[in-house]
Image (tube, helix red, strand yellow):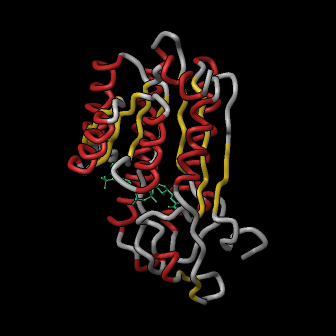
Amino acid sequence: MTEVADSKKTKKIALVTGASSGIGLSCARKLLAHGYTVVLAGRRQALLDEVADAARQRGEDALAVACDVTDDTSVTALFDTIRQRYGRLDVLFNNAGRSGPPVEIDEIPVDEWRAVVDTNLTGVFLCTRAAFGIMKKQSPQGGRIINNGSISAHAPRPYSIAYTATKHAITGLTKSVSLDGRPYDIVCGQIDIGNAATEMAARMARGVPQANGEIAIEPLMDVEHVADAVLHMAELPLSANVQFMTIMASKMPFVGRG
Ligand SMILES: NC(=O)c1ccc[n+]([C@@H]2O[C@H](COP(=O)([O-])OP(=O)(O)OC[C@H]3O[C@@H](n4cnc5c(N)ncnc54)[C@H](OP(=O)(O)O)[C@@H]3O)[C@@H](O)[C@H]2O)c1
């Protein structure tokens, strides 16, 4: 039996945050195409509706739910909807994220720092907390949480303290969930992406600051490769886990110190 047919048989429920654009959108479409029921979350309801409507026309099972991951009440409502509608959650892709202002550290307004932390760290925590509660109690027990880290979970770019700090923090969160999820078959892995061609990474093609002060154009990769990687992580049985995966544009300045 093919992989697609297997997924269709099990009909897993997946939630993708930040599914309105970029990596989240691409991953949501990939999971839908492979038979998952996908809940698409993000703040821009109209964009999510468009994707969900198109999916349903293809016979896929999609639900668009507006959610701001920084808002505890909004996240609670999202997971209440999932619980009431499907009664379980098999995969959470914690993807929603944002960058911070590209300025010197002493020039970062505190509210902008907090906005990045609220989205990239607290948002991931709030969704993880809610998913953990469902996965722990459901039968069959367990599920998979995939966190979107970054190359910035390993090394900073110039002027990226808030983004880099939150993405490093995601690594700690991933490890904690992996450990504390063991008794309940809740597994957690992290995908660290470098230069996937999305709105957020578009500036790489225009030129971005390097450690030596130069501005350089950096290569990008097709976001489809990320979607394939996330699908691979999602499809593993709960007895196996991709703990960390790095996927990047092969020639971007990262390994070999640039
Ligand atoms: N592209 C890359 O090369 C790259 C590399 C490393 C890591 N990443 C990570 O990949 C993730 C997605 O980035 P992307 O490149 O796909 O950028 P993107 O197109 O800007 O996507 C960001 C997504 O996050 C959602 N989002 C932002 N704030 C939110 C909030 N408060 N509540 C709910 N959703 C929120 C946005 O949806 P709404 O605006 O509709 O809310 C949007 O769908 C981020 O975590 C980013 O750090 C990307």
Relative to 128, is 181 above or below? above
Ligand 1's quadrant is bottom left
Q: Residue at x 67, y 47 (%)?
A: 245
State the residue at coordinates (48%, 25%): 90
Q: In the picture provided, is 66 more to the left or to the right than 20? A: left
Image quarter (top left, top right, bottom left or bottom right) of the C terminus = bottom right
Q: Furthest-bottom residue in view?
A: 214
Q: Position of residue 41 (x, y in %)?
A: 33, 41
Q: Return the residue nearer the eye: 63 or 256.
A: 63
Say left or right for 101 vs 213.
Answer: left
Instruction: Identify which residue, 172 or 77, lies in the foreground.
Output: 77
- Image coordinates for residue 242, horizontal then vertical, percent: 68, 38
Using the image, determine if residue 44 lies above or below residue 83: below
Q: In this view, which residue lies farthest toward the right?
A: 256
The relative height of residue 244 versus residue 81 in the rendered view (above or below) is below
Which image quadrant for residue 217? bottom right
**Looking at the image, which is closer to me, 36 or 109?**
36
Q: Horizontal and vertical percent for residue 98?
A: 41, 60
Question: Whole-percent x and y of residue 130?
Answer: 40, 29
Residue at 59% across / 85% down in the picture? 216
Quarter of the image that includes the N terminus? top right
- Report which quarter residue 229 is drawn in: top right
Above or below, comparing residue 76 to residue 170 in the picture = above
Badge count: 0
Q: Residue at x 35, y 59 (%)?
A: 115
